Amino acid sequence: MTGKKQSGFSLMETMVSLVVLLAVGGIVMTGMTQLLKTQSSIANRTEMHSSVRSATELLQQEIGQAGRITLGGPTANITLAANVASGALPTAFTLNTSGGAAVSVYPFEVLTVDVGPNQENVTLVTGVNAAGTAIFQVPHLAGAPVSALGAFATGIVPPTAAPANYPNGSTPTVLKLYGDINGDGNMMYVEYTCAAGTQAAPGVLYRNQVPITQVGKPAAGASMILLGNVLANPNDANGNAVPCFGYQVQPLGAGYCVTDVAVTLTVQTQRKDQQTQVFQPETKSLLNVAPRNIVEVYDTSQLVDSTRAQAMPATVTALLP
């Protein structure tokens, strides 16, 4: 009789196979764990980059739009509601708008009235809503077009620091701007406040917005937080502190205007990095953001017509403190 050949693995072979399987499984699990940590780190930093990019894009857009002046919406046709006479004394006038949109004028605003040989620039003596008074050099008929050309020279409110020394102006941590920020005919005052903190207690960036005709502004609160986890900016190469907001100031008439704004924000991730177990910081800088409307009126007033530099409304002055 011949014996039957036994099949299967011996105990030793099974143990060796299990050791190999455990080693391969350990390598795979280690790789997967590392991959998950890397993916978590990337998602953490991506979230941080996305939030700071959104904030800086909004800052860039609103700084660029600052100073824009308008009497009504983009398609509004604004005209004199009745005839006005010329003379040496202020004459009352009222404005009409074809679209029915609200019109708001204010003292010291410069309006361009009429077209052709009768066109003139008049500086308002009084003004509220759609009515005011001004001294007209020539008479104008009802229906004559009226516009506010130029821009607010102080659309980026000049800084309190030298050389502007502007009362209640912008600071290294508070950027103040106003104008038709959204291009919809609504004149708004916007205030960005950079309240930086530490890694243990990070700060925030607030954005406060009110119409320029509003009496008073609300205090910065949680509903106005634009960006969280804001840190103090690292010092520059010379060891000097880097502010959130910096201003390039130019003389304009008897005052000053801001023709460039530098924005520097440092933030950290929402969560600790899975690999390093520390918060990851990031600094975002916009070194030359030009408020195009103010730059244009600065160039125009220097070369052509100083009346294009519109004065700050008293209602905006009241919102600055």
Image (tube, rainbow, N blue to C red):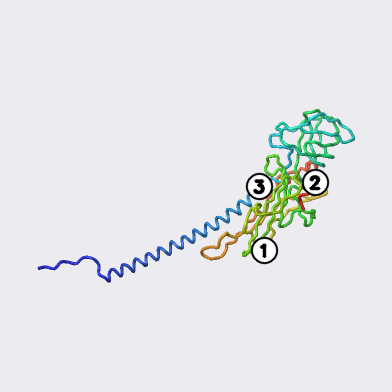
Label 1 with label 3: CB-CB less than 8 Å: no
Label 3 with label 2: CB-CB less than 8 Å: no
Q: Residue furthest right?
A: 88
Q: Residue furthest bottom?
A: 12
Does residue 34 sit above or below 89 in this rendering? below
Task: Say whether residue 247 is visible.
Answer: yes
Q: Residues within 10 Å of mark 2 (few under 14, many from 20)?
A: few
Residue 61, which numbered label? Answer: 3
Does residue 131 sit above or below 233 in this rendering? above
Does residue 15 sit above or below 192 in this rendering? below
The residue type indicated by label 3 comes to Gln
Nearer the camera: disc 3 or disc 2: 2
Q: Earlier in the sequence, mark 1 or mark 3?
A: 3
The residue type indicated by label 1 comes to Asn
Residue 205 in picture, x, y percent from top left: 66, 55
Residue 28 in picture, x, y percent from top left: 40, 63
- Nearer to the camera, 56 or 103: 103
Query: Which secondary structure lies at badge 3?
Result: helix
Q: Earlier in the sequence, mark 1 or mark 2?
A: 1
Q: Residues within 10 Å of mark 1 (few under 14, many from 20)?
A: few
Dot 1 corresponds to which residue? 235
Dot 2 corresponds to which residue? 314
